[in-house]
Image: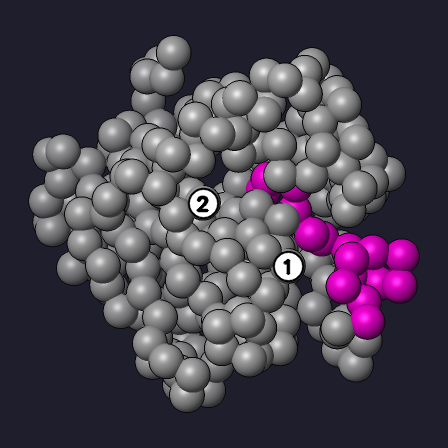
Amino acid sequence: MIFRYSSILFLTTLFCLSSFARDNVSPDEVLEYKNTPQGKLFLHTYYPDNWKKTDKRPAVVFFFGGGWSGGSYTQFSRHADYLASRGMVAFAADYRTKSKHKTEPKACVSDGKSAVRWIRGNAAKLGVDPEKIIAGGGSAGGHVAATTATIKAFDESSDDLSISPKPQALLLFNPVIDNSEKGYGYSRVEEYWKDFSPMHNIRRGIPPTIFICGTKDNLIPVATGELFKKKIEKVGGRCDLHWYKDAKHGFFNAMYTETMLEVDKFLVSLGYLKGPATLN
């Protein structure tokens, strides 16, 4: 377990700067991955400078946070753009939310699984290695990412179910991973929480995971993160848990550089990135 230090003033200042920068990183291409009764969904796509369709590069798809109720792909625009600069094909995904689409949280899970399936199914057109796809996200988006690796339910009937939605690694920023009565969002998912909660669906073969969270997160207690790591390791998996002292929920938006350096090291350790990080 690793602890980091932060200050409220530093976080507030950086949050303002990072939000401005994040909203101004434009994707190279916007690709439709799903057409739902509530509307079309897109992958905002970032390519490496020397990318070719014939490549077989690692890929990463990010899911934004917002309590399954709102949010925007722009939360992870800078993350996607940076990993594209390091040689990956990167995507920041849309998915259905309550405020925009009037849908339940389980639709978010369906869309997350659809996104990974679509990338894998179209890997040859995207210059992507179908066996090197990573899912990441923050808060409820971290939940969506985690469900692609853990949840068996909520497959979309229009998907090609012969294609696996399971990624090869997880990048989780203060993720919602416990949806029991003791966790987050239970009242909204009470009827199906056991099939919905990543914490309660960990099994052998779960991908290597990096889990980044703050010690004063009011939604993701330290004990929850520690239990998640323990359960993953119990089935033979890897979970790199990084605690940032006194940081609150969503702090990673402000501490972009520091947290992404940890992500970079994690991906280098798995062989998805090579060489030193290019963030200062």
Residue 213 drawn above or below residue 58 = above
How far apart in space, not on screen, are marks 2 and 1 (Cα)? 14 Å
Q: Which mark is residue 172?
A: none
Residue with the mark numbered 2:
75
Residue 109, magenta (yes or no): no
Circle 2: element type: helix
Residue 213 drawn above or below residue 157 = above
Circle 1: element type: loop
Q: Residue at x 39, y 29 (%)?
A: 271
Depth order, front residue of 244/56: 244
Q: Position of residue 170 (x, y in %)?
A: 54, 44
Q: Residues within 10 Å of mark 2 (few under 14, many from 20)?
A: many
Q: Position of residue 55 (x, y in %)?
A: 16, 45
Compared across the picture, whether 198 is left or right of 262 comes to right
Residue 221 drawn above or below residue 256 = below
Quarter of the image with the C terminus in it: top left
Depth order, front residue of 45/115: 45
Q: Which residues are magenta?
A: 172-187
Quarter of the image with the N terminus in it: top right
Residue 149 drawn above or below residue 174 = below
Q: Residue at x 29, y 39 (%)?
A: 24
Residue with the mark numbered 1:
67
Kind of residue at badge 1: Gly
Q: Residue at x 28, y 39 (%)?
A: 25
Q: Residue at x 45, y 66 (%)?
A: 95
- Earlier in the chain: of badge 2 and badge 1, it is 1
Compared across the picture, whether 218 is left or right of 128 comes to right
Compared across the picture, whether 94 is left or right of 145 comes to left
Kind of residue at badge 2: Gln
Q: Is residue 17 visible?
A: yes
